[in-house]
Image (spheres, helix red, strand yellow):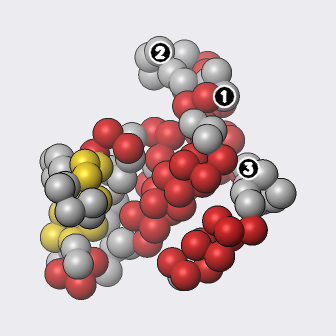
């Protein structure tokens, strides 16, 4: 819905999703959302463990960054892993070398969905795309 209205959310993560009484997922906290008037935006924002490489590279990005964050979230839920946040490289401050390590992992890590995800869940992933 947001993308149809030309809005990029930029902060998809578990803390920003609630489930209503009917069982639907609802996004909350639209503080980083932006109406896209141009094809690209350049603002550096979001939650580090869910940021798309395009945001980190600061070369301009589209609404596709939301799909990246959603993919990280789905991967976490299906594998019961907390992605980059569980890798012991979460930064304590910007000067910390661990901060740079996390961005290196986001830039260059290729995540392969392997046998950890059961065949039933793989079908669920196929229906999303």
Q: Nearer the viewer, residue 74 or 34?
A: 74
Q: Position of residue 117 (x, y in %)?
A: 73, 57
Circle 3 residues within 10 Å: few <14, some 14–19, many ≥20 = few
Rendered residue at 36%/53% (across/down): 12
Circle 2 residues within 10 Å: few <14, some 14–19, many ≥20 = few
User: Above or below — where is 24 with respect to 85?
Assistant: below
- Tell me the quadrant of the picture where the C terminus can be found: bottom right
Disc 1 vs disc 2: Cβ atoms closer than 8 Å?
A: no
Looking at the rendered structure, the secondary structure element under dot 1 is: loop
Q: Position of residue 104 (x, y in %)?
A: 66, 40
**Residue linked to disc 1:** 87
Q: Earlier in the sequence, mark 3 or mark 2?
A: 2
Is residue 63 visible in the rendered structure shown here? yes
Rendered residue at 22%/74% (across/down): 2
Q: Which mark is residue 16?
A: none
Q: Nearer the viewer, mark 1 or mark 3?
A: 1
Q: Earlier in the sequence, mark 1 or mark 3?
A: 1
Q: Nearer the viewer, mark 1 or mark 2?
A: 1
In the image, taking residue 103 as reference, residue 24 lies left or right, namely left
Q: Nearer the viewer, residue 69 or 25?
A: 25
Q: Earlier in the sequence, mark 1 or mark 2?
A: 1
* CA separation in Å, label 3 and label 2: 22 Å
**Residue linked to disc 2:** 92
Q: Which mark is residue 109?
A: 3
Rendered residue at 24%/84% (across/down): 4
């Amino acid at each position: 819905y947001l993308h149809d209205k030309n809005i990029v959310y930029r902060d998809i993560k578990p803390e920003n999703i609630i489930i209503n009484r009917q069982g639907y997922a609802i996004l909350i906290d639209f503080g980083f959302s932006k109406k896209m008037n141009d094809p690209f935006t350049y603002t550096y924002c979001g939650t580090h463990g869910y940021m798309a490489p395009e945001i980190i590279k600061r070369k301009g990005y589209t609404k596709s960054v939301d799909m990246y964050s959603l993919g990280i979230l789905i991967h976490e839920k299906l594998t019961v892993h907390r992605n980059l946040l569980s890798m012991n490289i979460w930064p304590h401050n910007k000067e910390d070398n661990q901060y740079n390590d996390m961005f290196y992992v986001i830039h260059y890590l290729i995540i392969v969905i392997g046998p950890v995800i059961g065949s039933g869940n793989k079908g669920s992933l196929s229906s999303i795309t």
